[in-house]
Amino acid sequence: MNKTIIAPSILSADFAHIGEEIKRMEKAGADWIHCDVMDGIFVPNITFGPKMIKDIRKLTDLVLDVHLMITEPIRYVEQFVTAGADYVTIHVEATDKVDETLDKIKKLGCKCGAVISPQTPVDALKSFISKCDLALVMSVHPGFGGQKFIESSLSKVKELRDMIDRINPNCILEIDGGITEENIGDVKRAGVEAIVAGSAIFGSADPAATIKRMRS
């Protein structure tokens, strides 16, 4: 990768002014928009569904990184792909049909990925990493914003970096949760290529400067 991919998390945006918020991220130099979909079952909170992705797609050409924190994701992936997702990632903890779901996403013409929560070992990805375009390590517990970065995530990132390099070097390694300007250096040195950040960017008085510092 030539540069660190910065993916602001739309959950930290002001939904009453979503169009302006998306344009603000474009102007600031964001690469992707990260969209957290929560169902109130796999995680306690509920966010939004395919219509939000469809509406965001109309507003931007940025990559839409759709992170499904939902049970039985195979039932819904087609809706999110049709809505305009560029990547659809699923939690290995949310389904016993990980292989089948990843295959379905790919057959729909979309890039696919797998996600592990903090309690899940990296080995849980070994059977699937060869078909992943994206592998995401959650560095906080899924379902809530504003949590503190879990330090043990760094060792998981290093382990996953080694796995990706051995099995599927084209897979992008992403991290999500508690990323700030203070810890991003450690995360990048551990081997991460794509950074999801919410309040650190949307809450910044100067998102462009924040993104620039995060990249450097």
Image: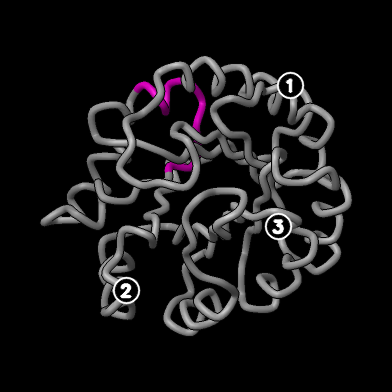
Alpha-carbon neighbours of circle 1 within 10 Å: few (<14), some, or many (≥20)? some
Give the residue type that dot 1 points to.
Asp
Residue 140 covered by magenta stretch: no
Which mark, residue 123?
A: 1
- Marks 1 and 2 close (CB-CB < 8 Å): no
Label 3 packing within 10 angstroms: few (<14), some (14-19), many (20+): many
- Name the residue: 83% across, 43% down: 96
Q: In the displayed structure, does residue 47 sit left or right of residue 104?
A: left
Q: Is residue 187 highlighted in magenta?
A: yes
Instruction: State the SS at label 2.
Output: helix
Task: Please give the range of residues in magenta.
Answer: 186-195
146 and 61: which one is in front? 146
Q: Earlier in the sequence, mark 1 or mark 2?
A: 2
Name the mark nearer the viewer: 3 or 2. Answer: 2
Image location of residue 52, percent across then percent down = 50, 77
Left or right of 43: which side holds 181?
Answer: left
Q: Earlier in the sequence, mark 1 or mark 3?
A: 3
Residue 3 visible, this orientation: no
Examine the rendered structure and indicate whether residue 82 appears above or below residue 29.
below
Q: Which residue is mark 2?
A: 15
Alpha-carbon span between mark 3 and mark 2: 26 Å
Residue to which mark 3 is pinned: 111
Residue at point 41%, 38% (across, down): 177
- The reply to whether dot 1 and dot 3 touch (C-beta < 8 Å) is no
